[in-house]
Image (cartoon, rainbow, N blue to C red):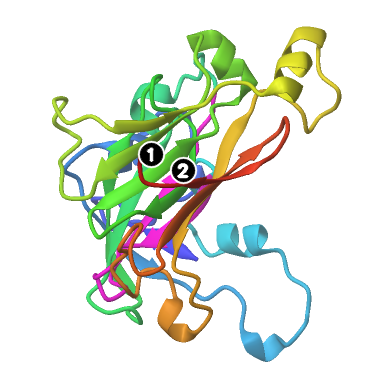
Amino acid sequence: MLQVFNAAGDPITQASQTPLNSPDQLAPHVYGSSFRTQWVTIHDTADGNAPFNANVLAKAADGTPFKRPENGVFRPGSHFKDFYFDETGDTNATSPENDNAGGWDSIFRLTQHDPSANSGHLSIFYKGNQAHAGFDNIQFLSRDSLGVVEDAGDTLHGQRNALDSGFVLDADKNYGNSSNQPLRWLAEGRDASATIDSAFGGFGKNDGDDEITGLHVSKGDPTVHGVLGRELPKLFHEGWRWFYTQQHGDNPTYEVVPAG
């Protein structure tokens, strides 16, 4: 379990993030901030197959909760010392936590001096907005280019009159500078099934507007040498390929290929 400490040296917990927009909820979402972290063991493997509830144990050990974290990746070439993960947020334009507390979405960067270290530092890499909301899958396309895709959800689609998109972020840019913006690489529409579903009120709980998900870049190496983050991706060269899946609707899987 990851534990993040506030400026006073106290763990940021679920209780300390209450009420909404409390100092402990707001502070990690401020560009330029940095917070000390440590990993805490909440379940000993010596217990074998004894069942346990990770959420309950994490709360009891003063774990730090985030707003729906969904995906995390190591930056290639960082020797597993730079880890990026997202919190998808609330996917609702009326959320009181949108602008300052991660309601739209956030991508955090966790740095450690060594992969096996128990301590490190956490900082905000990207804080979303209505036009860039609900990031749920992320994957490095190269050493510096981080691909992200939206799962904004049907409610937010209607509120902002826009479906999901895929973007690329530059790991070396400061997105606290408003002149730096994500680059869109995909604007998702509705396929036939999702269009019918939208027009006639839905076929079931797993239907709805098409969602981009399952972003993946790999050269297909199943050995330890192919662990994502170990090598620098060479997209479209030496066997490196780029895929994404479309959830809901017709549910196809796509491959992104070079133009021409």
Residue most extreme to the right: 203
Image coordinates of residue 184 in percent, x first then y, are: 34, 30
Labelled pair 2, 1 in contact (Cβ < 8 Å):
yes
Q: Quadrant of the C terminus?
A: top left
Image coordinates of residue 13 in percent, x first then y, are: 46, 50
Q: Residue at x 42, y 71 (%)?
A: 39
For badge 2, the amino acid type reads: Glu
| CA distance separating discs 2 and 1 | 5 Å
Residue extent of the magenta highlight: 69-91
Q: Residue at x 73, y 33 (%)?
A: 250
- Give the numbered dot on residue 106: 1
Is 32 inside the magenta-drawn segment?
no
The vertical placement of 200 against 184, above or below, is above
Q: Is residue 90 found left or right of 202 in the rendered image?
A: left
Q: Residue at x 17, y 31 (%)?
A: 180
Q: Nearer the viewer, residue 1 or 168?
A: 168
Q: Where is mark 2, residue-wise?
A: 87
Q: Is residue 189 found left or right of 173 in the rendered image?
A: right
Residue most extreme to the bottom: 46
For badge 1, the amino acid type reads: Ser
Among the 4 quarters of the image, the one containing residue 5: bottom left
Q: What is the secondary structure assignment of the residue under circle 1? A: strand
